[in-house]
Amino acid sequence: MATKEYSFYPGCSSQKGNSSSNYLVSVESMCEELDIKLNAIPDWNCCSASIGYSGGGELPRLALSARNIALSEQHNPGQEIVASCAACWLATREVKERLEQDSDLMAETNQALAEAGLKLKNETPVKHMVEVLIEDFGYEALGKHVKKPLEGIKIAGYVGCQTNRPFGIQGESFENPVYLDKLVETLGAEPMPSYEKKVQCCGGALAFSEPEKSQAMIKGIIEAAYDGGADMIVTPCPICQMNVEVYQDQINSTYGTKFKMPVVYYSTLMSVAYGRSAKDAALDGHVIRAKKLEEIASKT
Amino acid sequence: MSNLNVAMIEKYRNSFLHEVEANVEEGEWVKMCMQCGVCSGSCPLGPHWEHPPQEIFMMIRAGKRQEVLESSSMWMCTSCYSCIVRCPRELPITHIMHGLAHYAQRLGLAPKEQPTRKFANLFWDNISKRGRVNELKLGLSLYFMNGVSEGIKTALKMKDVGLGLVKTKRMNPMEMVGGHVVKDVKGFQAMLKKAKELEDARIAKHGAAQGN
């Protein structure tokens, strides 16, 4: 039996052929090494992320995450829900708490769920994968699995918004969270604790609708990592990862910069440090290759 | 002017604040704003808001109904939640801004050409049909949301970003046909339909004119 078992909400962007499919590959490798069993919520749906409010209003939007929690309670009873995506986690936890506090909304939500043959008890804790690592395992336990320390790599820990606010990780500050720095250190790499853009917004969904405004913010996030001498950026969020990685060419042509900064997930770093192959760490899923990690992964 | 908008003006003639409290998600918090301005100073897109959140709160109390609901301001919210965690009164500002934006759209007052409004509605259409995001269709509908000629220009500009994602298997051209979907599409759609009916009925009831 696995050491830990969770009801897993992977989310839309992690699906095969989607923008953070590489995240899921590395999460699965990391969890294998930590002996974590992830039981996907059967037939989960989109959480509507941060822009569902426009078309979805309140109740239809809440119903989305309520359906996921109800499916989890039915098929994976007694297991905490774990999401790897920042937006999935935020939306699901927000809905759980809103429905705990508002019995009218809870009643209406169950009326809507009944149309799909479901009923929400709303008794299931909702966690982000990072909470599992830090709270259910802890840095010391995570460090024991390191087979290939990430020596000689300096990494800027970009926490971003939605894994940090409004809920965040217990014991961490909203303004200066340090868990990524601690994790980087645990894996044998050099952190950059004075990374001043660590909680700067990347624009989120507005990177699509307001590209100029968002890319101005993304430029700052990358520039600060270079200024601190970082070799790469690490993040826990799929939107942060994509926004900060894939627009670097466009930013270079707008601002005359020469950015080529790899942006990886914490699970990418952990998979490599835990001795998994480049493929298992999904290093081939990065538009800007993290060459220093590829070198370590290829060492036998 | 939409019928619902007329009904709401009729009913809340003297107080836009009451209208917001009754009909906007988390609107009952608006009166708690103490005008410190920390939200406006914390907003990453703050300089681009026509009226930053602090100002929106004051305008609601001052009865500036049209100016608030027709504003592009709330649509600048990136959902970064900085305002929420810094507000000394702990107002759920992000949600109030989302709620105001949605309410403005419900009444037919939201700015038609606002790009985030258009994109957000495309996103909702995308997920509410099949239960999961079809990233390829969403991306393409975004490029073409302002017409064909601008769409082709945007698509060309985005070509390299798209190719990079296809090469790393993070975008799949085959999503054009089929793509990811929930198994119980019927139940999923019935649930959303019911939720919408319940919410519409609640707001229509609030909009029903008093007296007579």
Image: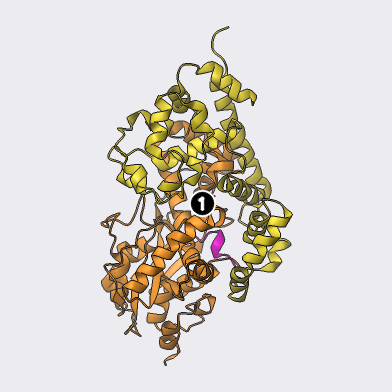
Q: In the figure, the orange chain has which letter? A: A
Q: Amino acid at mark 1?
A: Ala
Crowding at mark 1 (Cα within 10 Å: few <14, some 14-19, many 20+): many
As drawn, which residue projects farthest toward the top? B212
Q: Which residues are magenta?
A: A9-16
Classify the position of the C terminus of chain A by image quarter.
Answer: bottom left
* Residue A143 image point, x, y percent: 30, 76
Q: Is residue A217 left or right of residue B91?
A: right
Residue B11 visible: yes
In reply to whether residue A13 is colored magenta, the answer given is: yes
Residue identifier under label 1: A49
Residue A2 visible: no
Q: Is residue B176 left or right of residue B79?
A: right
Residue sitting nearer the eye, B22 or B67:
B67
* Residue A282 image point, x, y percent: 50, 77
Instruction: Give the residue displayed 64% in from the left and 26% down from the top.
Output: B2
Among the 4 quarters of the image, the one containing residue B167: bottom right
Among the 4 quarters of the image, the one containing residue B140: bottom right
